[in-house]
Image: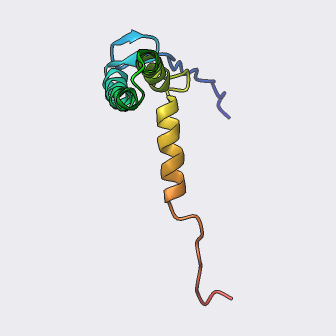
Amino acid sequence: MQDKKEIMLYIPMGIKLEQEFFNGFGKKELVRSIITMSICFVISFIIYLFNMTQSVLIVGLLSSVFGSIMLCVKDSQNQSVLDYIFNVVNFYKEQQIYDYVGDYF
């Protein structure tokens, strides 16, 4: 019998494929956050037109900036809150009940 040697395989962790502005926030997340911010800006401006108070507009704009960045920043598992929401929606869109009909029994 031959002696079995244990082969150690080194897999580096934390290698980034794209340049990031800060940890977990790259170009793709920047585009997503700009789209989210623009939608929230429109919504807060429409609310401002009906309410006519500047505090509502300022709070809406600031919360949309911080909220969109928080939604798009990826964590250590390389998944953001927005990605998680998309995955959950896609999971519930898929077929959940499988009716098997056959002559197996």
For the residue pair 17 and 47, the one nearer the viewer reads as 47
Colour setup of the view: rainbow
The answer to whether residue 12 is above or below residue 104 is: above
Side (left or right) of 96 relative to 59: right
In the figure, 91 relative to 96: above or below? Answer: above
Q: Position of residue 29 (x, y in %)?
A: 37, 23
Residue at 31 percent across and 27 percent down: it is 38
Observer-nearest of 32 and 64? 64
**In the shown orientation, is residue 1 left or right of residue 8?**
right
Q: Position of residue 101 (x, y in %)?
A: 58, 84
Q: Residue 31: name its quadrant.
A: top left
Which residue is drawn at the image coordinates 52% and 37% (left, top)? Answer: 84
Residue 14 coordinates in the image, percent (x, y): 49, 16
Task: Name the residue nearer the viewer: 70 or 50.
Answer: 50
The residue at the point 34 percent across, 27 percent down is 45
Q: Left or right? Give the position of 104 relative to 28.
A: right
The percent position of residue 63, horizontal first and vertical second, equals: 47, 19
Q: Tell me the quarter of the image containing the N terminus.
A: top right
Quadrant, the C terminus: bottom right
Count of all numbered marks drawn on residues in the image: 0
Is residue 93 shown left or right of residue 39? Answer: right
Residue under the point 44% across and 22% down: 60
Looking at the image, which residue sits at the far top? 22
Quadrant of the rendered image containing residue 34? top left
Up the image or down, 104 lies above or below 74; here it is below
Q: Nearer the viewer, residue 16 or 60?
A: 60
